Image (cartoon, rainbow, N blue to C red):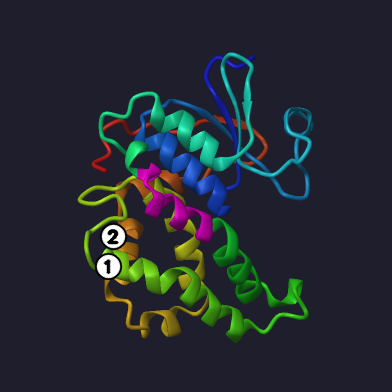
Amino acid sequence: MTAIPLLYTYRRCPYAMRARMALLIAARGFDAFEIVLRDKPAALLALSPKATVPVLHLAGGGVIEESWEIMRWALAANDQQGRWSRAQSDDNLALLACNDGPFKQHLDRYKYPGRHPEAEPDLHRAQAMIALLLPLNERLQRSRFIGGDSACATDLAIFPFVRQFAAVEPGWFAAQPLSALHAWLADWRASDLFAACMVKLPTQTVTSFPNFPSLPR
């Protein structure tokens, strides 16, 4: 058992990012183990044979292996800000399903064409826009965040993937008529929460992750 939860993570993984952001914004203290993809630790393999991050080893000995469930654990227990409850609307759950399903599939084939020799990157870029980014831009024209006036778990869950898409061809993305989405993305990139999430940790060792209980979102 661990004294406090231990998160197996990888800094650039969008699934791990959203887990770290949720733990931080919920002020849930945790230790982190930054893995090396080519040398995953035996302790992680013992906890989760699928060996994909994030994996959260709870202080009581339980294990949570999926990023959205880690977010639930972090946010739902003390939901005074409604960050978890506001994410449970049909519209928000549909956005999450699209992000984690069709959008992620198109993103992978757009960003990593070498891994998918049959892929046509421009086609997958266009399909990713249709699947998520255009509807998300329309949604954000009505409110600053997916969660309304303040962020909810859906914002945290989707942001890392939109950030990844935007970084493939920054000039092309910046030229797209997505003003509300651009503002939302810029807001997240500049946030203290994201800066805290992306603190660089030593690899292959347990590190007490910085805790920021007064983050503004």
Query: In the visual, does 111 lie left or right of 38?
Result: left
SS for tag 2?
Answer: helix
Nearer-the-camera pick, 197 or 115: 115
CA gap between label 1 and label 2 equals: 6 Å
The image position of residue 16, as x and y in percent, is 55, 45
Vertical comparison of 32 with 115: above or below: above
Nearer-the-camera pick, 135 or 185: 135
Question: Which quarter of the figure is the N terminus placed in?
Answer: top right
Residue drawn at x 75%, y 71% is 115
- Count of marks, rendered view: 2
Magenta stretch secondary structure, dominant:
helix
Residue drawn at x 63%, y 82% is 121
The image position of residue 129, as x and y in percent, is 47, 76
| Residue marked by disc 1 | 183
Vertical comparison of 76 with 122: above or below: above
SS for tag 1?
Answer: helix
- The amino acid type of the residue labelled 2 equals Asp
Residue drawn at x 59%, y 59% is 101
Cβ–Cβ under 8 Å for marks 1 and 2: yes
Q: Quadrant of residue 67?
A: top right
Which residue is situated farthest in the front direction here? 90
Q: Give the range drawn in magenta.
A: 87-99
Nearer-the-camera pick, 132 or 108: 132
Residue 54 in magenta?
A: no
Q: Which mark is residue 187?
A: 2
Question: Which quarter of the figure is the C terminus placed in?
Answer: top left
The image position of residue 163, as x and y in percent, is 45, 64
- The amino acid type of the residue labelled 1 equals Ala
